[in-house]
Image (cartoon, grey):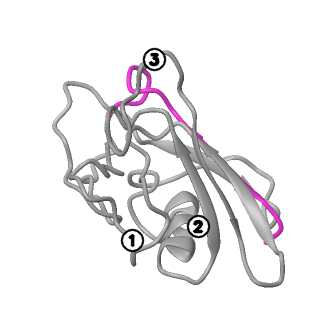
Amino acid sequence: MDWWFVFKFNAESFPGCGGFQRTCPFGGTVESYKSFGQQFAFASSADGTLQQGFGCVGDTAADPLGATFEQVYNGKFFYVLWNDQFYGDPIQTQFAPAGHSKGMLAWNDDGDGMVLQVSTPSWPASGSSNAPRKTDGTRWGA
């Protein structure tokens, strides 16, 4: 597949995960929020038609976001992650919550790679299962 696109709906318009339970496959624990939303729609180079996803985006290796992150997290890639919501782990954040940017740049030995820009709350702080975040803050399924 050459590309894919995922759009996560907001919690007010599409709350919850369509009846599915949230998980944190990349560390941490699910937090209880009054309102959350992880429902999504997606399209890809295989089928450019936007279609409704099922479950919570990023919660399993069966959805596009979770599958992509799982390949990097459990694979052998070079990566850079960024997240403006660490709030003191690993460094003190002075301007939070002013920004809202999270993502990953990953590439392999051949130079093939991708850029991923996300708005997932508490985006994982480590891109490798060999170096997990030291605090219980890697809440993917937020």
Q: Residue at x 24, y 56 (%)?
A: 28
Is residue 12 covered in magenta? yes
Q: Amino acid at mark 2?
A: Thr
Chief SS of the magenta region: loop
- Taking the image as shown, residue 41 lies to the left or right of residue 27, namely right
Observer-side mark, 1 or 2, equals 1
The numbered disc on residue 95 is 3
- Measure how far apart labels 3 and 1 are at the Cα level: 27 Å
Name the secondary structure under disc 1. Answer: loop
- First in sequence, mark 1 or 2: give its number: 2
The amino acid type found where label 3 is placed reads Phe
Residue assigned mark 1: 131
Which part of the image, by quadrant, shows the C terminus? top left
- Disc 2/disc 3 C-alpha distance (Å): 30 Å
| Pointer 2 residue | 68
Start and end of the magenta stretch?
A: 1-15
Mark 2 and mark 3 residues within 8 Å of each other at the beta carbon = no
- Return the disc, 2 or 3, that comes first in the chain's sequence: 2
Going by the image, does 106 lie left or right of 65? right
Mark 1 surroundings: few (<14), some (14-19) or many (≥20) residues within 10 A: few
